[in-house]
Image (cartoon, grey):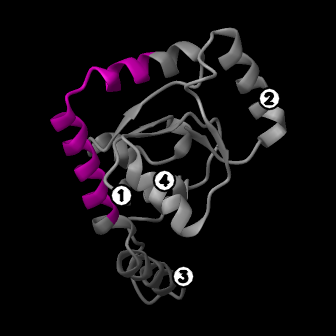
Amino acid sequence: MIAGWDQDGHEHTLRRLTSDVAIDGSVHFLGPRFGADKHALLRSATAFVLPSVSEGLPMVVLEAWSCGLPVLMTSHCNLPIGFERGAALQIDTDVDGLKSGLETMAGMSDEELKRMGERGRRLCEERFAQRETSNMIGDVYRWLLKRGPKPACVMTD
């Protein structure tokens, strides 16, 4: 299943490619999903893939992790902690990189996938929950007002 906006006509290209390789009957284009519909879709998934070439902070990866999904993503997703913590496998943006990541994930046991998803869920609870992000924002404001040390979440390099 492929969910999301048809950015720059990519859906047409993907539909043509799936037809060219005769898998169009098993690939479903769902369009954008929101709220409870998106959450239900994530809860029914086996894994989540984001082969992005540019992201700030992809909330959809955090949503996938919060649902306990193992993730394939690129370094452009700017969540290196996911690779460090074993919550995601890194893929490249080209066809071979995506193919390799999908093959790696397909070769993993159900238990390995479950453990990877659980690491993502814990990572969300530890680093991306509202309480944690609120504390980090407070630390940044205190630092900016010269009322506290520079927080570890601030990178000035």
Looking at the picture, how far across and down is residue 5, in whole percent?
Answer: 73, 47
Looking at the picture, how far across and down is residue 54, in whole percent?
Answer: 65, 41
Q: Nearer the viewer, mark 1 or mark 4?
A: 4
Q: CA distance from mark 2 to mark 3?
A: 47 Å
Disc 1 target residue? 67
Q: Nearer the viewer, residue 149 or 11?
A: 11
Q: Amino acid at mark 1?
A: Cys
Q: Is residue 9 magenta?
A: no
Q: Nearer the viewer, residue 93 or 108?
A: 108
Q: Is residue 131 above or below residue 26?
A: below
* Residue drawn 37% across the image and 54% down it: 65
The span picked out in magenta is 100-124
Q: Is residue 20 above or below residue 30?
A: above
Disc 3 target residue? 144
Disc 4 target residue? 41
N-terminal of the two: label 2 or label 3? 2
Q: For the residues labelled 4 and 2, say whether their Cβ atoms are less than 8 Å apart.
A: no
* Residue drawn 29% across the image and 58% down it: 121
Q: Amino acid at mark 3?
A: Leu
Mark 1, secondary structure of its residue: loop
